[in-house]
């Protein structure tokens, strides 16, 4: 692009970008090559090279610190031209490139690529943008039609693992029905058993299945993502779901659910228990608390700083082992936790078991939950009453006050409209808070059902404790306890799982 200038008064900056250090190849010039093109271009067109801004980041990401610095610099008057080797340095898709190009042009900054014709490239980008928009519209129509078909009971896609489609002829018409696959059902059941009873993660389940001789479809070993896809698919309990996980780049669609579409491999109760177990595993750092041979790993926390209590073996004279729990933060630095909070593992585990045994009485559980929740419930109920009162009085008070001001000609019509809008905004805020409080109170009142289920869970856990290994004990304990805060003087604060 020729630039007519006779005096060195026009300034230019260069924008350089690569996805990773040392990236080269077709349309992937190194930073050195891009900078050389920038300097040569400035010299040929009598531009003053002011600065270069360099990002080492993929085009898919938007966190380009140097690009933002460059825009601030040139918009503030630091340069007249932005020089790039190709326009695709601005982004990965046509819409993003065009948006950034026109943003700079609107501020009077000329964008010039060194290795391509700007007019030809802009035309190509516009065509690509229009083609992309049409492609997106087509995809949306296809997804909408798929959603409608599924809502009517038509399955789209390959059979889920554990199920098979069987063709049958009825009055000359070929139809399909679903059956449980007798070869894959035992594999699914074993996955569920390993997750629930042995408290294994996706990778460990896949490794164990593969070692046992099971194979995924196509004869492949079971990978972690395959196990995850199977165990989190609602088809296991017979429900067909579409749209729960939109593919990358696709817009979110409404979730379509069709219960009792497939023959169920798991009962509703088994499915809910499995999902609860998987969600508990996701709460803890991967592989740490669940792989631990310590019963309270991932449950016990320091009562003084809130840090996790971790198990550690220490050795005494003659090689005798002692298992203990320590505050992990205090072990790293006394600056993180000033208390040397350590306890014998057998003593702490016994103390928690003894603490739990007293909650096998429903009456005691109700008293405990009532005492812990009463103050919070009372505070929220009082706030809800206040919010409802303010909403009830708001409209009348507002219009009385405004009418009075208008009679005295203090407010113009425009000011009245603005004040009315402000009032509506405040009322909307109160309505939002009212809905939040009602939801919180409903959740608190729902905990009353915990008084019925918790004693049974604790009683079952205590009865089976001696006969289970530590992984099974931990898996069951994590369904009862969300957290136990342990203090140096052995005081315990228990939070039950809802």
Image (spheres, helix red, strand yellow):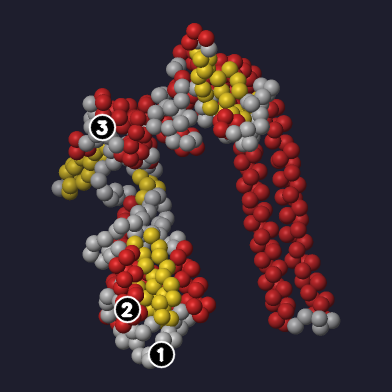
Query: Circle 2 sits in a helix, a strand or a loop, which is it?
Result: helix
Q: Position of residue 63 (x, y in %)?
A: 45, 60
Residue at the image point whose x is 77% and y is 80% from the top: 411
| Residue contact between numbered discs 1 and 2, judged by CB atoms under 8 Å | no
Q: Nearer the viewer, mark 2 or mark 3?
A: 2
Whether residue 239 sits left or right of residue 329 in the image: it is left
Q: How many marks?
A: 3
Q: Compute the Cα span from label 1 to label 2.
A: 16 Å
Q: Please give the residue where the numbered disc 3 appears in the rendered image.
A: 184
Q: Please give the residue where the numbered disc 1 appears in the rendered image.
A: 7
Q: Please give the residue where the numbered disc 2 appears in the rendered image.
A: 41
**Residue that lies at the very extreme toward the left in this rendered image:** 172
Whether residue 218 sits left or right of residue 321 in the image: it is left
Residue at the image point whose x is 34% and y is 59% from the top: 19
Q: Compute the Cα span from label 2 to label 3.
A: 65 Å
Q: Compute the Cα span from label 1 to label 3.
A: 78 Å
Which of the 4 quarters of the picture holds residue 287? top left
Q: Earlier in the sequence, mark 1 or mark 3?
A: 1
Assign the C terminus to one quadrant of the image: top right
Q: Nearest the camera: 76 or 43?
A: 43
Taking 29 as reference, is 232 above or below it? above
| Residue contact between numbered discs 1 and 3, judged by CB atoms under 8 Å | no
Q: Count residues near mark 2 (Cα–Cα under 10 Å), then give few for <14, some for 14-19, many for 20+.
A: many
Q: Position of residue 455 (x, y in %)?
A: 59, 23
- Can residue 467 be seen? yes
Q: Nearest the camera: 202 or 303?
A: 303
Whether residue 456 sits left or right of residue 9 in the image: it is right
Residue at the image point whose x is 46% and y is 22% from the top: 293
């Amino acid at each position: 692009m020729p630039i007519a200038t006779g005096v060195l008064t026009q300034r230019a900056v260069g924008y350089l970008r690569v996805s990773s250090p040392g990236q080269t190849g077709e349309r992937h010039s190194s930073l050195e090559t891009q900078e050389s093109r920038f300097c040569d271009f400035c010299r040929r067109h009598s531009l003053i090279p002011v600065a270069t801004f360099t990002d080492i980041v993929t085009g898919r990401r938007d966190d380009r610190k140097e690009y933002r610095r460059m825009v601030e610099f040139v918009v503030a008057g630091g340069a007249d031209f932005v020089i790039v080797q190709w326009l695709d340095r601005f982004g990965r898709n046509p819409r993003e490139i065009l948006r950034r190009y026109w943003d700079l042009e609107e501020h009077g900054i000329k964008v010039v690529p060194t290795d391509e014709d700007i007019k030809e490239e802009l035309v190509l980008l516009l065509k690509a943008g229009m083609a992309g928009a049409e492609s997106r519209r087509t995809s949306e129509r296809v997804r909408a039609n798929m959603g409608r078909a599924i809502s009517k009971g038509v399955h789209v896609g390959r059979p889920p693992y554990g199920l098979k489609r069987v063709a049958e002829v009825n009055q000359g018409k070929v139809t399909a029905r679903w059956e449980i696959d007798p070869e894959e059902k035992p594999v699914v059941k074993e996955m569920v058993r390993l997750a629930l009873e042995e408290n294994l993660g996706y990778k460990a389940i896949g490794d164990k299945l593969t070692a046992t001789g099971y194979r995924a479809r196509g004869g492949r070993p079971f990978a972690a993502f395959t196990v995850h896809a199977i165990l989190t698919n609602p088809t296991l309990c017979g429900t067909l779901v579409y749209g729960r996980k939109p593919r990358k780049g696709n817009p979110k669609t409404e979730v379509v659910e069709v219960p009792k579409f497939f023959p169920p491999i798991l009962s509703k109760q088994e499915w809910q228990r499995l999902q609860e177990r998987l969600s508990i595993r996701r709460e803890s750092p991967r592989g740490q608390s669940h792989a631990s041979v310590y019963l309270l790993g991932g449950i016990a926390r320091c009562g003084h700083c809130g840090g996790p209590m971790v198990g550690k073996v220490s050795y005494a004279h003659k090689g005798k082992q002692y298992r203990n729990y320590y505050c992990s933060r205090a072990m790293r630095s006394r600056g993180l936790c000033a208390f040397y909070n350590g306890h014998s593992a057998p003593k702490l585990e016994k103390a928690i078991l003894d603490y739990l045994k007293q909650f096998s009485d429903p009456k005691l559980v109700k008293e405990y939950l009532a005492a812990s929740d009463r103050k919070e419930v009372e505070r929220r109920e009082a706030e809800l009453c206040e919010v409802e009162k303010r909403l009830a009085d708001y409209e009348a008070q507002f219009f009385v006050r405004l009418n009075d001001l208008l009679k005295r000609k203090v407010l113009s019509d425009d000011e009245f409209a603005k004040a009315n809008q402000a009032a509506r905004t405040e009322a909307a805020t109160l309505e939002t808070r009212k809905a939040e409080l009602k939801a919180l109170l409903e959740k608190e009142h729902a905990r009353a059902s915990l008084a019925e289920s918790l004693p049974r869970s604790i009683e079952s856990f205590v009865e089976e404790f001696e006969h289970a290994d530590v992984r099974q004990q931990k898996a069951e304990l994590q369904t009862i306890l969300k957290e136990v805060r342990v203090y140096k003087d052995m005081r315990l604060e228990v939070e039950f799982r809802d």
